[in-house]
Image (spheres, rainbow, N blue to C red):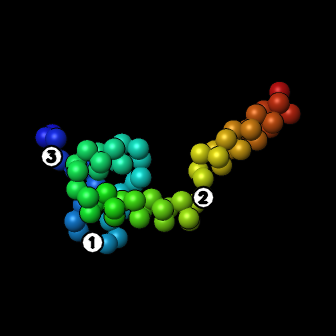
Amino acid sequence: MSESTSYCPPEGPPHHVVPLYGVTIHHCIAGGDLQKMKDLCVEGEKYLAEHGDVRAALEVLKAEIAKAEAKAG
């Protein structure tokens, strides 16, 4: 894989989904294509607007798992 290979959303059908994992974002930055970086940023903002802060929700989930395990234990 060359450094010019970009992991930004590929050209193609608009229904193609690229997961917004950190590696996807970092590869997009490394690719250096300003328009692709802006497009990925817009997709990231849409994701956050639709799904909220996933990291915070995961922490709440972990706390609830701990509570359930304490009751069951």
Q: First in sequence: mark 3 or mark 1?
A: 3
Residues 44 and 12: in front is 44
The quarter of the picture where residue 23 lies is top left
Quadrant in which the C terminus is drawn: top right
Residues 73 and 9: in front is 9
**Residue 72 in view here:** no
Q: Which residue occupies the extreme bottom position in the image?
A: 14
Tag in front: 1 or 2: 2
Element type at mark 2 = loop
- Residue picked out by circle 3: 4
C-alpha separation, residue under disc 1 versus residue under disc 2: 26 Å
Tag in front: 3 or 1: 3
Kind of residue at badge 2: Gly
Residue 7 in the image, given as x and y percentages of width and height = 26, 50
Residue 13 in the image, given as x and y percentages of width and height = 27, 71
Quadrant in which the N terminus is drawn: top left
Q: Going 23% across and 51% down the picture, which residue do you hit?
A: 32
- Residue picked out by circle 2: 52
Kind of residue at badge 3: Ser
Vertical arrangement, residue 53 with respect to residue 42, above or below: above
Q: Going 76% across and 34% down the picture, which residue do you hit?
A: 66
Q: Going 42% across and 63% down the picture, which residue do you hit?
A: 43
Left or right side of 60 for 13? left
Residue 72 in the image, given as x and y percentages of width and height = 83, 32
Kind of residue at badge 1: Pro
Q: Going 60% across and 58% down the picture, which residue do you hit?
A: 52
- Residue picked out by circle 1: 13
C-alpha separation, residue under disc 3 versus residue under disc 1: 22 Å
